[in-house]
């Protein structure tokens, strides 16, 4: 029996964006990452959700994981501040997080789990080092291991990073 006003799985098929509220956007300072952030803010604003922004500092194996990464942390804070300004242009507030990890992919997947987000929207630059497009190891890791939907927003061919 169908009750008026109840949501069914079929409704999700007709309005796929309606189920995406909380979104994680990894940011590395490239233009396509900020474009992914704009997309995430539009969706979250429409659905009264939250956007989390994360910048990951990858720590070399020769250093302790909690090593002081002064210059990298300063650069990361600038990237997060830019992300906050980009979101503010859409009259939206994001929550930024600076993370340190050996691998960006695992840190992002863990953050997605901790925040219980509905999706990760990742901007990827167009790279074709051997003639074929390569999304990069972070994107590949997330596509295999993320606990939620993963959306890739790929930059156009030839677009500057």
Image (tube, helix red, strand yellow):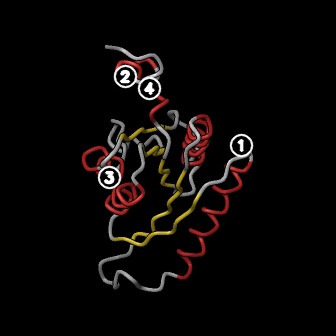
Circle 1 is placed at which residue position?
A: 90
Report the mark closest to the observer, 4 or 2.
2
Mark 2 lies on residue: 8
On the image, which quarter does residue 150 sit in? top left
For marks 1 and 2, give the one nearer the viewer: 2
Q: Residue at position x 49%, y 30% from top? A: 18
Residue 6 vs residue 95, the one in the foreground: 6
Q: Position of residue 50 (x, y in %)?
A: 55, 49
> Tags 3 and 4 in contact by the CB under 8 Å rule?
no
Q: In the image, 56: left or right of 83?
A: left
Q: Which one is earlier in the sequence, the residue at label 4 or at label 2?
A: 2
Real-space Cα distance between discs 1 and 4?
22 Å
- Disc with the residue nearer the chain's start (3 vs 1): 1
Quadrant where the image shows the N terminus: top left
Label 2 and label 3: CA atoms lie apart by 36 Å
**Residues at discs 4 and 2 in contact (Cβ within 8 Å):** no
Q: Residue 155, how many percent across, how many down? A: 51, 37
Residue named by callout 3: 137
Residue 124, can we see it?
no
Dot 1: element? loop
Q: Which residue is mark 4?
A: 16
Taking the spot 60% from the left edge, 42% from the top edge, the residue there is: 41
**Label 4 crowd bin: few (<14), some (14–19), many (20+), radius 10 Å:** few
Q: Quadrant of residue 94?
A: bottom right
Horizontal side of residue 45 vs 55, given as left or right: right
Secondary element under disc 4, as helix, strand or loop, is helix
Q: Residue at x 48, y 29 (%)?
A: 17
């Amino acid at each position: 029996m169908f009750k008026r006003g109840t949501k069914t799985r079929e409704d999700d098929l007709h309005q796929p964006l309606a189920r995406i509220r909380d979104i994680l956007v990894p940011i590395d300072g490239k233009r396509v990452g900020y474009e992914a952030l704009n997309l995430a803010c539009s969706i979250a604003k429409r659905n009264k959700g939250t956007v989390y922004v994360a910048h990951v500092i990858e720590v070399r194996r020769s250093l302790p994981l909690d090593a002081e990464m002064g210059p990298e942390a300063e650069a990361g804070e600038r990237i997060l501040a830019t992300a906050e300004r980009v979101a503010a242009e859409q009259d939206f507030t994001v929550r930024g997080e600076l993370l340190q990890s050996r691998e960006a992919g695992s840190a992002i997947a863990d953050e997605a789990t901790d925040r219980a987000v509905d999706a990760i929207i990742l901007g990827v630059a167009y790279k074709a080092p051997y003639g074929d497009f390569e999304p990069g190891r972070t994107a590949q890791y997330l596509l295999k291991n993320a606990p939620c939907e993963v959306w890739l927003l790929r930059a156009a061919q030839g677009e500057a990073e």
